Image (cartoon, rainbow, N blue to C red):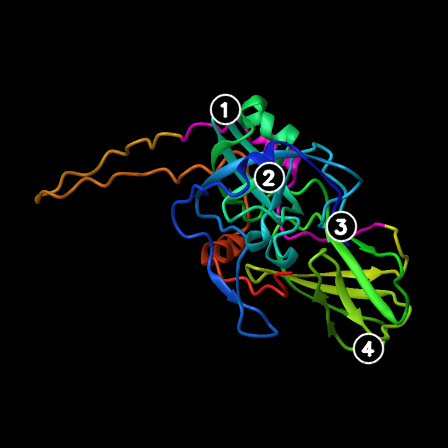
Amino acid sequence: MTAHRLLAPRWLATGGAVLLAGVLGVALLLQNGGSACAAPPSSAEHKGKATFYDLAGTQGNCSTKPPADDLYVALGKSEYSGAAACGSYLDVTGPKGKVRVKVFDSCPECAVGHLDLSRTAFKKIGKEIDGIIPITYRAVPNAPAPGPLSITFVEGTSQYYWAITIDNHSNPIKSVQAKGPGGGLRSAGLKDYNVWIIDGRMGNGPFQVRMTDIYGKTITAKNIKLRPQQKQTTSVRFATGTAAQADANAAPKPAKKATPKPSKPSSSPSASATSVAPPLLDPTEAAPDQTDVALAAAEPAVKAASCG
């Protein structure tokens, strides 16, 4: 299952030197052997280059439809990481500004640090005529999603073959488990076209689907019915905010100055205590809860199911 792509000026960059600074994630071991593959981009800032392309068809290699705002990115094999990066978000900064894009597709010929953006996204941060632009980029932990997490059983799913796509999860998903009535949890494997599969009898449902993201947060979607090719919107999400809430915070209020209180005279001199206001949150992101903050700060390694 591969994406249909129309190649744009990306071909100019093929074989060129990749502009990199710093380490791009940690090396991971595949579950089936000793080969190493790279993780999805971390929230540390990375340097690279960007090109653009036009999608031919209705979906990318992540097996989901393009986001409504048409702001998406295709990653090279290492950073795509066997579909582990699908559905996550990157903040990309170019000569003209910054744009937030969803990981939606793979770019087999792109080296590490080479992002292939949608034309719409590229034009927000660079001149289309340039074709290739220098960029910096980083992953966005707990990025606000446009809605609750959704689950769709793919075509061909049955009581004997359990296969789903997951969307609007925002954080990369590390593991998926599911169970039907009277059964125990079974682990699903991730394919490089972003479908989680349990090959064997799971029954007709309804199912509970337990998902854990790369930061260790676990959520469970309940009452998921066996309805192939019908998107089911759940009531759960990894991120704590919404895109609308993030927009509402776009103009942060300045921190209030602390009002000094009169102090009693002291017989011995002492250093004056200074009240420091807490730092403002990034206005483009919704405020995570304290658990999410601690998890995001940990930046654990992601164990990819496959590198394709």
Which quadrant of the rendered structure holds the C terminus? bottom right
Residue to which mark 3 is pinned: 63
> Percent position (x, y) of residue 268?
8, 45
Please give the range of residues in magenta.
Answer: 231-255
Q: Nearer the viewer, mark 4 or mark 3?
A: 3
Cα separation, mark 2 vs mark 3, equals: 17 Å
Residue to which mark 4 is pinned: 183
Q: Nearer the viewer, mark 2 or mark 1?
A: 2
> Percent position (x, y) of residue 203?
89, 72
Q: Front-most of 244 and 123?
A: 123
Disc 1 residue type? Lys
Disc 4 residue type? Gly
Cα separation, mark 1 vs mark 3, equals: 31 Å
Question: Which of pointers 4 and 2 lies earlier in the amino acid sequence?
Answer: 2
Cα separation, mark 4 vs mark 3, equals: 28 Å
Q: Is residue 193 left or right of residue 131?
A: right
Residue to which mark 2 is pinned: 116
Residue drawn at x 40%, y 39% as measured from the top left:
279
Which secondary structure lies at badge 2?
A: strand
Verify CB contact (< 8 Å) between mark 4 and mark 2: no
Residue 292 covered by magenta stretch: no
Residue drawn at x 58%, y 26% as measured from the top left:
124
Residue to which mark 1 is pinned: 96
Disc 4 residue crowd, few under 14, some 14–19, many 20+, Cα 10 Å: few
Disc 3 residue type? Ser
> Percent position (x, y) of residue 210?
71, 65
Q: Nearer the viewer, mark 4 or mark 2?
A: 2
Occupied quadrant, residue 213:
bottom right
